[in-house]
Image (spheres, grey):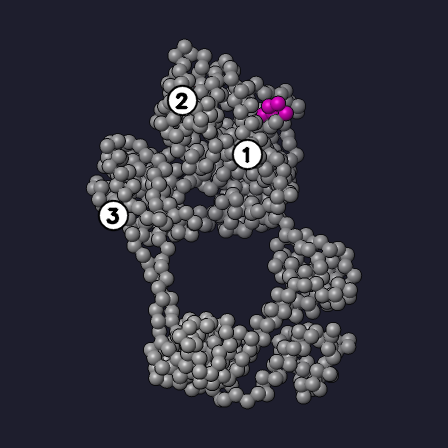
Amino acid sequence: MAIKLSVLAEDLNSSVSELKKMLKQYDFAWNVEDESVDPDIAELLEQELGTNKSSVDEVVDKVEINLEREIVKSQRKQVAGKSNVTNSNKQSATLKTDFLEMADSISVKELSEKTGINAAKLIGELMKNGIISNINQQLDYETVALIMSEFGIVVKRLAQTSSTSELLSQDISQIMGEDDSEDLESRPPIITIMGHVDHGKTKLLDTIRNANVVASESGGITQHIAAYQIKHKEKKITFLDTPGHEAFTEMRSRGAKLTDIAILVVSAAEGVKPTTIEAINHAKEAKVPLIVAINKMDLDTANPDKVKSELAEYEVLPEDWGGEVPMVPISALTGMGVEDLLDTIVLLSDVNQYKANPKRPPVCTVVETHVAPGLGPVATIVVNAGTLELGQPFVVGDAYGKVKSLLDDKGNKLNSLPPSGAALLAGLSKTPHAGDVLQVTNSDKEARLRAEEIAMHRKNEFLNGANNLLEIVSRIKSGSLKVLKLIVKTDTKGSFDAISQSLAKIKHDEVTTKIIHYGVGAVTQSDIAMATASGAIVISFHTETDPNVQKIAEQRGVEVRNYKIIYELIDDITQFLSGMLEPEEVRIDLGKAEVRQIFFTKRKEMIVGLKITNGLLKKSAKIEVVKDDEVIGVGQLLGLQKGTESVTEIKAPNECGIKFKGNIALEEGMKLQAYEIEIRQRSL
Ligand code: GDP
């Protein structure tokens, strides 16, 4: 029930005008019609006036005035935190809705129009929560949710285009944010084909594409498109037509995550080759499930069992041997087994349930780019989520544009592209890079400005080498699993064995190393791409690194470390790992004091006079309250006062005033133990 200001003024031995002055000072709202305030605010005024009148000694008086403001402010926040629906609010406004959808921000005016709540009422409500606003003020989601809860209105934030910093990170999951599970719908799986050269990747992609050719509806000119979609038994499947793990890793190194399933093509006649192993490591590192296509089964020399046993050495175990990897014998040349392979893809997709929200603002990934006659710069894109539509303005890497046309691989013109859809996009200011993430913006201007921002950032990144070791260590540190990933290239297999054995001996519960790829020979461009994609460092032992590769590594900020002596290598790694350990907290006792006088008490904060009996007190010290040798409460010093002076430290023997915040009310005679926590770096 509201309390009349006149009644309150009488109670508090004050005047209505004095109360109004205070209300203004603290931005509290009052009802101008009947000159009343909410009980919460009345209570605050009561406390305010009450304490102002109490006589405390000179020292504390000074501290208190400042304190008072802080406390009132925090209480105001507490009032704001009370989100239970007040009947008065519900009744006094004619609500149009009990549900509101908003983007990142909304103006007071719009909010009023959408909800039916009078704008003045909204401004008053905002004031109560310490926010001074006018009708055009933009309010963020958190504020709106808080204020609307007072009116019983549920607020939902719509998925929005992400910030430029998120775009710069190219981290697709961060860009997409979390969609509500009820908005998610099934989408076709996206497949990449990997494997050793000449094992039949291109042939397989062609066979699948040709077997599913449907006559072009529009009779358009077929464009080269680096991704296509087929229908197999009423289920769509999207294939990235970029055979090999290079494109996959390059895309990943740019932060893109586009592949749901990797098909590893292994020739049944030739078996596992170095690139097969590389592809396995790349897929494993990206946590993408594998299906093995044992190809060239039409040849007399085909030996699928040999392939299986060779793969088993790399922990790729076929299902029929109790493993988890489906393996399908096929011939890309004759088409034998290709249907089974597609069945297997559908089966795995049914198990894994790939989903996306088709209604959110679209996010797409660039698979390949080129300049096409008549169209200018074009990009093959695949949609991660949302639905891309003609005419939408967008930013993609440091390029921008407006969706001018969307063509599928058969030359059909599309008006929109749903999740997992693939098309050739025209309307770009310039060619972006494979792996760049496309985001739709609110306007052409926003698209251009964002592209410019990204271009500038990339230039700086290029100059600074953004991914150096320090950054890798800090990135790993912020993660929950602290694993330093290594790519190891050595002169011989013997050297590698010696290094991996020594690395295995560095044991610690919290940090460890993981060799994500190794090989005999010089560091290659592919190693650098993998290091970029995985946040790994490259170790080269007794091998020369080609200056060109070294240059690419520097441009990408990948750390390539060359060693000739094993213990130096191990020493360095041990140091990196030490740097990754969480620092430890050490308690340092500072001093003891005794409570002499209680000056002022406000909920959990107090101002008290102390006598320091031992050691010293520091302004931000933690406090244990001790009674009869037992800790009966804890808290913290928020301020330290010597005489009228605010100080940071006082030594014993001395008297002082402190501002104390804790879970206990201090009483005269209580003993305090002050301490602080020192953060110390640990080493392995
Ligand atoms: P990629 O380098 O992995 O893309 O391999 P390609 O698809 O270019 O194939 C390399 C060669 O193997 C080509 O001459 C293909 O015709 C041939 N090839 C591909 N698949 C098969 C197959 O199933 N059987 C036979 N006999 N040859 C194949």
Counting labels gives 3
Label 3 sits on residue: 571
Mark 1 or mark 2: which comes first in sequence?
2
Extreme top residue here? 300
What secondary structure is marked by label 2? helix
Residue at (59% x, 39% y) in the render: 356
SS for callout 3: helix
CB under 8 Å between discs 3 and 1 = no
Q: What residue type is labelled 1?
A: Asn
Residue 141 in percent (x, y) is at 62, 57
Across and down, in percent, residue 618 comes to 39, 75
Name the image quarter holding residue 339: top right
Does residue 346 appear anywhere in the picture? Answer: yes
Residue 118 horizontal/vertical position (percent):
75, 64
Left/right of residue 179 with respect to residue 539 in the rendered view: right
State the CA–CA distance, disc 2 to disc 3: 39 Å
Image: magenta residue range: 229-234
> Which label sits on residue 308?
2
In the picture, the disc for residue 238 is none
Disc with the residue nearer the chain's start (3 vs 1) = 1
**Which sits in the foreground, 548 or 45?**
45
User: Which type of secondary structure does the marked residue at label 1 adopt?
Assistant: helix
Crowding at mark 2 (Cα within 10 Å: few <14, some 14-19, many 20+): many
User: Local crowd at mark 1 within 10 Å, few (<14), some, or many (≥20)?
Assistant: few
Residue at 64% in and 79% down: 45
Beta carbon at label 3 within 8 Å of ligand 1: no
Given the image, on which type of amino acid does mark 2 rest? Lys
Q: Mark 1 points at which residue?
A: 352
